Amino acid sequence: MRPAGRFSGLRSAACLAALLPGLVFASDAREWLSRMEQAVEGLNYEGTFVHMSAGTMETLHVIHRVADGVPTERLFSRDQPGREVIRSGDEVTCIFADEKAVLVERREVAASSPLRAVLPQLSPRLDQWYEFRVMGRTRQLGRPAMVVEIRPRDSDRYGHRLWLDEDTAMPLKVHLVSESGHPVEALHFVDIELPDEIPAERMQPGVSTEGFTWYRTREDVHQHAPEIQPSWQARDLPPGFELSVAHQQVLPGSDHAVEHLVYSDGLASVSVFVEPAGQGDAGMVGPAHIGAAHAYSALVHGHQVTVVGEVPALTVRRIALSMTPVGRDG
Amino acid sequence: MKFTPEEQLSALLDGELPEIETELVVRRSLREESLRRTAIRYCLIGDAMRDELPHCGPVDLVSRVRSGLETDPGPAPVLSEPQRRPWPRLVAGLAVAASVALVAVLAVPGGGHRPDPAPLSASQVAAPAAGPVYTVPPAYTRQAAGGPDRLTRYYINHSEYSTLMGGRSALSRIVARTPSADGEYPAVRIEKVNAPR
């Protein structure tokens, strides 16, 4: 039997022991997550946080503004000036000042939609793959906070541990956790403010992009990728993962279409990108990662196949090595 | 009694700063880079104490915390004035306890504090001990037309399909992706493997 969730620390443990007579029902965890979703999308806030994963640490700042019900978000590095991401309407603008490049990604949603895919309604089927628990109360950034855990039941996926502000449900600390409950990536706010209003000028990039090269999706291709009947399939998916999106799209700065499949277990998702090998650049083979987001690339039947996701390395590898054209045995 | 900004910060992070002072400290930390750095350092010491940092292997964790302690000038003089400077003393206590805990990690095979050690950590999977691992030269994944490399473009595109919790982390990784002096990306590694058939 797997031990109960570990939340070590002397004062934290004492606090939990005093306040937590037993694990609270999963439905409470879902209510907290629902509140969090509304807070993250619907509130004005601005704060500095530290992003940590194996061997790297970066200080970032986020400004989230909601005006007339439409959210806009600006995320930038405090350690590397000129690294910014601005999400507004149906566009995601990534500024890489050190490369003098701006990449604009079109989002497949209406301008008034939430900036992030909402929690997938936390359907009951998720209980097969995750355990939802309210771990108890503690304090974070000097405020009462509730610790909520989404613990994966196997090693095919990661879960989350969240420290939510008790008043607003804003996540003050977020961990991506493995099956054993150990953090593999962390996001810690060190200060956060929730002002009633944020001036629009605060959402402007902090760096001039004059002279930068802009990479956009060509105007003559579909901005919103049509759903397609996939021509590739995964023959070996971890339990619970199903095809949720299949479309063809042209990535910004590229001149050819990529088949993009998304497989999800309802919470974790992985993307599979398939394009003809040899187009644009050299092929990629093998694993890679940025933080705890893993990737695995393979050359299959003359195509470059790359699987990307916030899942363990073995999961992206397993999916990548099972990709085959529909109608072929592999 | 007047506390220093660092003492107020420590009290804030412990949830023990009077509300009237909280806003002042937060605003000051937004203005002052050094105070913000101190906040991060205190947070990390506390998190290391509570074993809430991402696992990078015991040696890595020890070196990180030691490095943090070496650059932390605050706690040392406080021990001689226990009545007047309670907050940095608490941080010092956390730091000492953290280093003791870390020694324990090294001393107890398998990590005595972890009842359910992961059979394989993410970092170990990403950079396995066996087999050659090397950093991807930018040209390897760089688009012929220039701009961010193909893998980065995949990551950016995929972030649109991450859930609420994963979305911010996904873009944070893109922003934090750090090129080294020679233009390579240490965070992006690739392992030589046999091409699948």
Image (cartoon, coloured by chain):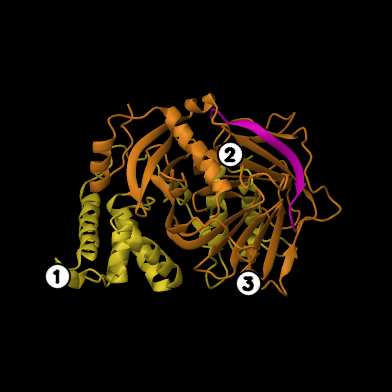
Q: Could you give the CA–CA distance between mark 3 and mark 2, rounded to whole angstroms?
A: 33 Å
Residue type of the residue flagged with mark 1: Glu
Question: Taking the image as drawn, is residue A37 in sight?
Answer: yes
Give the residue at mark 1.
B81
Magenta stretch, residue numbers? A239-252
Mark 2 and mark 1 residues within 8 Å of each other at the beta carbon: no
Identify the residue at horizontal 73%, vertical 49% (top origin): A277
From the viewer's side, name the closer residue of A268 and A64.
A64
Is disc 2 surrounded by few (<14), some (14 to 19) or many (20+) residues within 10 Å? many
Q: Quick one: which chain is yellow?
A: B
Queried whether the magenta region covers residue A248, the answer comes back as yes
From the viewer's side, name the closer residue of B64 and A192.
A192
Q: Quick one: which chain is orange?
A: A
Image quadrant where residue A81 sits: bottom right
Q: Decide which of tag 3 and tag 2 comes sooner along the chain.
A: 3
Q: Position of residue A278 (x, y in %)?
A: 74, 53
Is disc 1 surrounded by few (<14), some (14 to 19) or many (20+) residues within 10 Å? few
Give the residue at mark 3.
A207
Residue B3 lies, with reference to residue A129, above or below; the image says below
**Chain on which label 1 sits:** B
Check the picture and name the quadrant holding the N terminus of chain A: top left
Residue type of the residue flagged with mark 2: Ser
Residue A143 lies, with reference to residue B147, above or below; the image says above
Identify the residue at horizontal 32%, vertical 70% (top origin): B5
